Image (cartoon, rainbow, N blue to C red):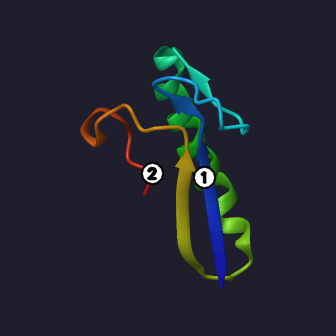
Amino acid sequence: MLGLYVHIPFCVRKCPYWDFNSYAGLEAVAEPYLRAVALEAAVVGPKVFGRRVGTVYIGGGSFFWSQSSHPQMS
C-alpha cells in the first residue's frame, strides 16, 4: 500500500523557520499549480501498477484559500 505526499508551496507569508519550498504573494499561480497537480495525478495514477494508495498527505504552506474556490483533487 502506498502513501503519497502532495506539496502545496503557497503561504500567506514566509515563516523564518520553514526551510522547505514555499512562496508568499503568488496567489495568482496557486490555481494553475493545483490544476497541474490534479492533471499529474490523473496521468500518473494508473501507473502505480495495481498498488493501492491508502493515504494522501497534503502539506506545505499555509492554506490561505477556501476549499470551494479551488479545484478538487479527487
**Crowd rating for badge 2 (residues with CA inside 10 Å; few <14, some 14–19, many 20+):** few
Where 5 falls versus 23 (above or below)?
Answer: below
List x then y, in percent, for residue 26.
53, 16
Pointers 1 and 2 in contact (C-beta within 8 Å): yes
SS assignment at label 1: strand
Q: Nearer the viewer, residue 44 or 11?
A: 11
Q: In which quadrant is the C terminus drawn?
A: bottom left
SS assignment at label 2: loop
Identify the residue shown where x is 66% and y is 77%: 2
Residue reaching furthest to the left: 68
**Crowd rating for badge 1 (residues with CA inside 10 Å; few <14, some 14–19, many 20+):** few
List x then y, in percent, for residue 12.
45, 25
Residue reaching furthest to the front: 16
Q: Nearer the viewer, residue 26 or 32?
A: 26
Where 50 falls versus 3 (above or below)?
Answer: below
Identify the residue shown where x is 51% and y is 37%: 34
Q: Amino acid at mark 1?
A: Val
Where 26 falls versus 60 (above or below)?
Answer: above
C-alpha gap between disc 1 and disc 2: 10 Å
Q: Amino acid at mark 2?
A: Met
Q: Which residue is mark 2?
A: 73
Tally of numbered tags = 2
List x then y, in percent, for residue 65.
34, 32
Q: In which quadrant is the N terminus drawn?
A: bottom right
Please tell me which of labels 1 and 2 falls first in the chain.
1
Where 43 falls versus 13 (above or below)?
Answer: below
Identify the residue shown where x is 36% and y is 35%: 70
Q: Which residue is mark 1?
A: 6
List x then y, in percent, for residue 51.
68, 82
Q: In the drawing, does residue 13 fall left or right of residue 2?
A: left
